[in-house]
Amino acid sequence: MAMLDYSFPVDAAVKALKFGRKLHYGPALAETLFAGLHLLPEGVDAVLPVPLHWRRKTYRGFNQAMEIASPVALRLDLPVVRNVVRHKATPYQSGLDARRRASNLAAAFQVRSALPYRHVLIVDDVFTTGATTQALANVVRKAGVHDVSVMAVAAAK
């Protein structure tokens, strides 16, 4: 579920966080998710920010999904999943069609150790085709997670 449309001023705020290193936008964007927390199914027991490949995280200096997910986990009093990684460097998803987005993410994520969770909430900044969250959900389900929910700040059309 996405809480807002990816249009002005939301798109400007997401871009300022992601590309402008305006980290104070992370908690502000997380606030938009708080309004939808009551819509989640019961039983969420961990929060999983969409991982960045280590090279992109090193270049950027942070993971924007983590900046949004951490306040959500704090609000829900849940742990943040840190042992799922994007081990395959992928090109930016923006500008790709749905088919190329899906193939771009094939085998991109990896679970590094056991996931002792039953229902994980994936948090991302922007939901477009769902390719990223679907690929991530598939990997955590294969690792034993039974249910996966998804929340994003905004949906792009």
Image: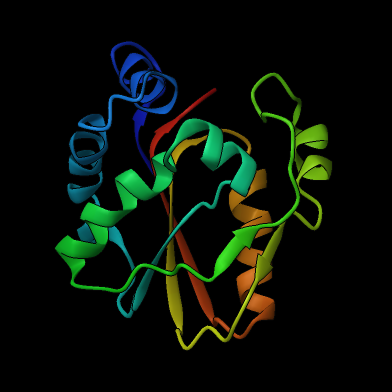
x then y, percent, for residue 154: 39, 32
- The residue at 26%/73% (across/down) is 78
Please give the name of the residue rendered at 15% of the width and 61% of the height, measured from the top-left corner: 75
Answer left or right for 17 relative to 130.
left
Establish if 144 lies above or below 8.
below
Question: Which quarter shows the C terminus?
Answer: top right
Residue 141 percent across, percent down from the top left? 63, 76
* Vertical placement of residue 71 versus 110, above or below: above
**How many numbered marks does the figure carry?**
0
Residue at the (18%, 63%) spot, across then down:
74
Q: Nearer the viewer, residue 110 or 4?
A: 110
Horizontal relation, residue 48 to residue 25: left or right: right
Quarter holding residue 24: top left
Q: Is residue 69 something one can see in this rendering? A: yes
Is 133 located above or below residue 9 in the figure? below
Horizontally, residue 8 falls left or right of residue 143, namely: left
Give x and y (percent) for residue 12: 35, 14
Q: Find the residue positioned furthest to the top.
A: 8
How are the colours assigned in the image? rainbow
Residue 100: where, in percent of width, then height?
82, 33
Q: Using the image, determine if residue 82 lies above or below residue 157.
A: below
Residue sitting nearer the eye, 18 or 128: 18
State which quadrant residue 134 falls in.
bottom right
Question: Is residue 1 in view from this perspective?
Answer: no
Query: In terms of depth relative to the viewer, which is nearer, 40 or 61?
Result: 61
Q: Can you tell which quarter of the image residue 91 is in? A: top right
